[in-house]
Amino acid sequence: LMGFLYSMDKRYPFYAGAASVGLGVLVLIGMMWHWPYLRETDQQHITSDDDEVTEMDEANWKYIAEKPKKGDYMKLGKALGVMLIEKRYRWVSHLDRHLQFLDTVYPVLSIDSLQQRHQNIQFLRTGILSLRSEWEHMQYNAA
């Protein structure tokens, strides 16, 4: 095809190449628009192993530590930083104190059994929600 186009005019093969690249770009844009989930990484589709365990598998459950990548740390850091700024915490100038606070707030979870792990998480969630409710009540009464 390119030889035939070249025999007609020297510029035609370059135009044909540019047109095929442009068509390929249009196809890619169309695919990204029609199937946006194809752009997601496999990591985004992974759900927690704890959520998918059935009662039969609960006895055989074994904790498997996650292996975060640099991008995962970056996302966590950005999300946490934005959240703290929106809630008016001065974390940039008091980073060491905030890290100590986070270390206190997030205790080590049990990995002995799935049931114990769920109990740990539920206990933390209940305590934090209770504390949040008391905090909002205190703020409302102070105003």
Image: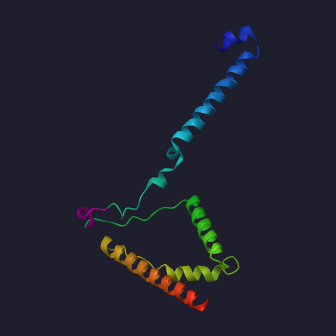
Q: Residue furthest left?
A: 56
* Residue located 46% across and 81% down the image: 128
Residue 42 percent location from the top left of the image: 47, 50
Q: Identify the residue at horizontal 59%, vertical 70% (top origin).
A: 80
Of 81 and 138, the residue lying toward us: 138
Q: Main secondary structure of the magenta part?
A: helix
Q: Is residue 70 left or right of residue 43?
A: right
Q: Is residue 67 above or below residue 85?
A: above
Vertical position of residue 2 compared to residue 29: above or below: above
Q: In the displayed orientation, state which residue is furthest to the bottom.
A: 142
Q: In the image, 56: left or right of 30?
A: left
Q: Of 64 and 143, which appears nearest the observer?
A: 143
Q: Is residue 136 above or below residue 36?
A: below
Q: Locate the C terminus by quadrant.
A: bottom right
Residue 88 belongs to magenta span: no
Instruction: State whether residue 107 is above or below residue 30.
Output: below
**In which quadrant is the N terminus drawn?**
top right
User: How are the colours assigned in the image?
Assistant: rainbow
Q: In the rendered view, does 94 fall on the left or right side of 62? A: right
Could you tell me which residue is drawn at 33 percent across and 74 percent down?
112
Looking at the rendering, the stretch of residues picked out in magenta corresponds to: 53-58
**In the shown orientation, is residue 64 left or right of residue 57?**
right
- Estimate the x, y position of residue 29 in percent, counting from the top left: 60, 37
Q: Residue furthest right?
A: 10
For the point 70% across and 17% down, the residue is: 13
x and y percentages locating residue 114 in the rendered image: 32, 70
Residue 83 lies, in percent from the top left, at 60, 71
Number of marks: 0
